[in-house]
Amino acid sequence: METFNIKKILVPVDFSETSMKALDHAVYIAKLNTADITLLNVVESTYSYAPSTDYTALAFTNMETYEKEIQKQAKDHILKLAQKIKKKEGVNIIGIVSKGWVKEEILDAARSMRADIIIMGTHGVKGFREFITGSNTFRVVNEAQCPVLSVQKDAVTPGFKNILVPFRDKPHSREKVDYAIKMAELYGAKIFVLGIDMDDDEGQLKKIELEAAQIKRIIEKHGLKCTVKVKSSPYLAEKILKYAKKKGIDLIVIMADLDRMQVSEFFMGPFAQQMVNHSPIPVLSIRPTFNPNTVDLGGYGW
């Protein structure tokens, strides 16, 4: 992987309690890394996507005026927020407002500024809507080129002391270890490695145990504390969250891939989607790096 050097942080905000929690984490990370923060508020347009007819022209004109006022208020609000944080925390921070689809505007902003990380709150979604569309945060996780740290409203105070690295025996699954090491070094945290055997196969379980021991050695070479555990379960997200709660985990590092390995994932949604939408613990999602020397193209839907 490329060096995970955090110097440019993008924080989408909608001024909700959840997005403010994400901003708290961003400020904390920015101070540790002497990084710059860009706040982004997206005003979603409604009139521009509707059909234009003589009957509705006046209504659309009024709506456009209304949206311009909303944009003005949003800009005033985000600039005041940026100024307040800069004065209080001493970090370099700016605020911008754009109009369009939330996911697209966030991704465009991240590309334009070459963000090293996106930190954003997630309100999550449930039921049929989650299965069909997911949340804006998960859509960003799915397509962002940089890591995404997603934060729920119940997230604890910024600062990570116990980092969980769950993995299963599949391509890319161990790529996140380097990112976990970087975060652990940054925060002075301990790393917990959790290997999951989803096949309930004795041979597979042994293989995962060997891989977990290898990961532990890599982590300890960096002078970090590491604990390893291997479990069998067909319900990946459920097992990880249960283990995380038991161990007092405050950051989970996962891969932002969408492969569906088990029947349960077809009903509950892909693993990454479950984690981003439902984890009360902040989740750092890492985009897999395509490497033809290590990826089995025939078995994983690439």
Image: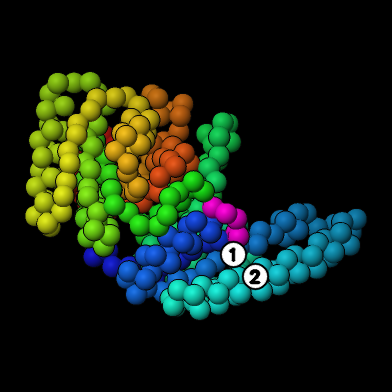
Q: Is residue 203 left or right of residue 125?
A: left
- Asked which quadrant contains residue 238, the reply is top left
Relative to 109, is 103 above or below? above
Q: Quadrant of the C terminus?
A: top left
Residue flagged by tag 2: what amino acid is it? His
Q: Which residue is mark 2?
A: 77
Residue 17 highlighted magenta (yes or no)? yes
Q: Is residue 7 left or right of residue 165?
A: right
Residue 211 position, x and y percent, is 13, 38
- Asked which quadrant contains residue 232, the reply is top left
Does residue 237 show up? yes
Relative to 175, is 260 above or below? above
For disc 2, the neighbor class at 10 Å (few under 14, some 14 to 19, many from 20) is: some
Residue 34 position, x and y percent, is 34, 75
Residue 53 highlighted magenta (yes or no)? no
Contact between labelled residues 1 and 2, with CB atoms less than 8 Å apart: yes
- The residue shown at (55%, 77%) is 83
Does residue 298 show up? no
Q: Is residue 106 left or right of residue 238?
A: right
Give the CA separation, mark 2 to mark 1. 10 Å
Q: Quadrant of the N terminus?
A: bottom left
- The residue shown at (28%, 44%) is 164
Q: Which residue is mark 1?
A: 41
Earlier sequence position, callout 2 versus callout 1: 1
Principal secondary structure, stretch drawn in magenta: loop
- The region drawn magenta spans 14-18
Q: Secondary structure at mark 2?
A: helix
